[in-house]
Image: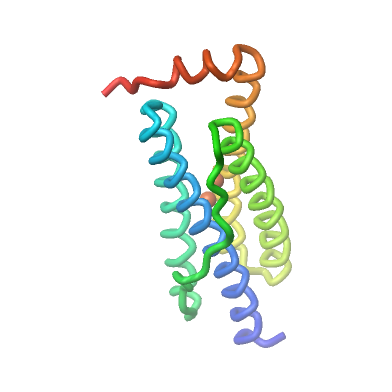
Amino acid sequence: MDSVDKNSKIIGLLNDALKAEFSAIQQYWLHGLTLKHWGFHKIGQLFIDESVEERAHVNKIAKRILQLGGYPKFDAIDKVSIGEDIVEMLNYNLTFEQNTIIQYRNSIHEISSQHDYTTADMLTDILIEEEGHKEWLQSQLRIIAEIGVAQYLVENMHSEE
Ligand SMILES: [Fe+2]
Ligand SMILES: [Fe+2]
């Protein structure tokens, strides 16, 4: 594979990552706004904070695509799941993060085999954060299973601000 083909393959994988990141941004953002609208300001803000973290991932990936001579695609997005309640929202985001983690692992494997360790390392840093997101969502669902959804929501109504 010559270097043009190699780069276009890597740029393609990075644009796939952008698509997943844009979907994550929109889903967390929509859930955050909805939760705040329902009066659950604290948990709503945490969802919006997650959305901001996903945006930082877009920043890193898009910059790398430009460095590789490609065009970052900002117009592609996967399905955004709305969610009727907090448990559904947490589960939708958990599924999303789990799929993204698999996608990143596969891309890192492929890009490492092309010897582009700079891109692979960048994606590994993002992967670590996605695993953190997955753990946070799992712990929220565990807390709900322990204390019940009503109690969880009471504790997550008010933000400190
Ligand atoms: Fe992300
Ligand atoms: Fe994430």
Which quarter of the figure has residue 74?
bottom left
List x then y, in percent, for residue 27. Answer: 50, 49
Q: Quadrant of the C terminus?
A: top left
Q: Nearer the viewer, residue 150 or 155?
A: 150
The residue closer to the viewer here, 131 or 22, is 22
Q: Is residue 118 visible?
A: no
| In-front residue for pair 135/110 | 135
The reply, left or right, for residue 55 in relation to residue 120 is left
Q: Nearer the viewer, residue 100 or 92?
A: 92
- Residue 82 image offset from top left, x and y in percent: 53, 46
Residue at 59% across, 67% down: 16
Q: Is residue 76 above or below residue 120?
A: below
Q: What color scheme is it?
A: rainbow
The percent coordinates of residue 60 (x first, y second) are: 45, 59
Q: Quadrant of the N terminus?
A: bottom right
| Residue drawn 64% across the image and 52% down it | 100
Point out the residue furthest to the left here: 161
Q: Residue at x 37, y 33 (%)?
A: 36
Q: Which residue occupies 37% across, 27% down?
A: 39
| Residue 136 location (% of width, % of height) | 57, 31
Is 133 placed left or right of 60 in the picture?
right
Q: Is residue 149 above or below residue 84?
A: above
Q: Quadrant of residue 8?
A: bottom right
- Residue 30 visible here: yes
Q: How many marks?
A: 0
